[in-house]
Image (cartoon, helix red, strand yellow):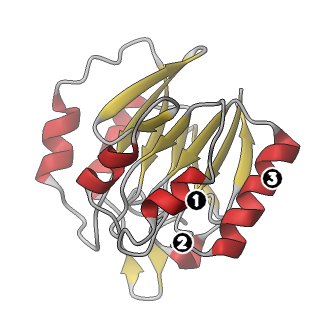
Amino acid sequence: MKIYAFTDVHGETKKIDKILSDISVFKPDVLVCCGDLTDFGGDLKKHISRFDLEIPFLILHGNHESIAQIESISGKSIINLHKNFFEFEDYTFLGYGGGGFVQESEDFCDFVENLDIKGKKLVIVTHMPPFKTMLDKLEMGYRGLIPLREFIINKKPALVLSGHLHENAGKVDFIQNTVLINPGGGKLIEI
């Protein structure tokens, strides 16, 4: 399966142009946005209308959109992945959006506590990166989500896609055998 993922474009036309060009070249099976497609929700419908695609577009809110804004653009091929699942081929995509600069989230813990995901090949999509990785490392220390790291260790997903920290765009890391990627302005991933 070919996944084209991106994050944190904040409505920048040149970045969206590049993403659309890459999509036409790479022809992915699934498109994923790890949040912050816009800058505080501005022109969301205008930006999303450019993604008139025949493939699933999985999107969640970052810290620059609200859940309601993303829900308002969900439709035929645009799926709000926040606290949601999407099955494609042999994989289950699981999403959790939002976040700022907190390292704990009772809401995330409540969401994942009773998930029935045994035997599924998981792709986790979040806006916040997992704690203590190259994806959340800043000069001031690690800024990622601690319970996300614990969830990855316990559930062993195949892939985790996240954004939020622009300084770490394009970085790849691992937690055990799980691949972690901040796709930045766009990255093709084959799994």
Instruction: Give the total of numbered labels.
Output: 3
Q: Mark 1 points at which residue?
A: 182
Q: Which amino acid does label 2 sit on?
A: Gly
Tell me which residue sits at (56%, 52%) in the image: 49
Rendering coords of residue 36 (x, y %): 44, 65
Q: What element carries label 1?
A: loop
Q: Mark 3 points at which residue?
A: 22
The relative height of residue 165 versus residue 79 in the rendered view (above or below) is below
Residue density around tag 3, few if under 14, some if 14–19, many if 20 or more, within 10 Å:
some
Mark 2 or mark 1: which is in front? 2
For the residue pair 14 and 95, the one nearer the viewer reads as 14
For the residue pair 37 and 132, the one nearer the viewer reads as 37
Rendering coords of residue 99 (x, y %): 28, 63
Residue 33 falls left or right of residue 29: left
Q: What residue type is labelled 1?
A: Asn
Q: Mark 2 points at which residue?
A: 11
Q: Do tag 1 and tag 3 residues touch (Cβ < 8 Å)?
A: no
Residue density around tag 2, few if under 14, some if 14–19, many if 20 or more, within 10 Å:
many
Tell me which residue sits at (32%, 32%) in the image: 84
Rendering coords of residue 190 (x, y %): 74, 35
Query: Disc 2 or 1, which lies upstream in sequence?
Result: 2
Residue 105: name its quadrant: bottom left
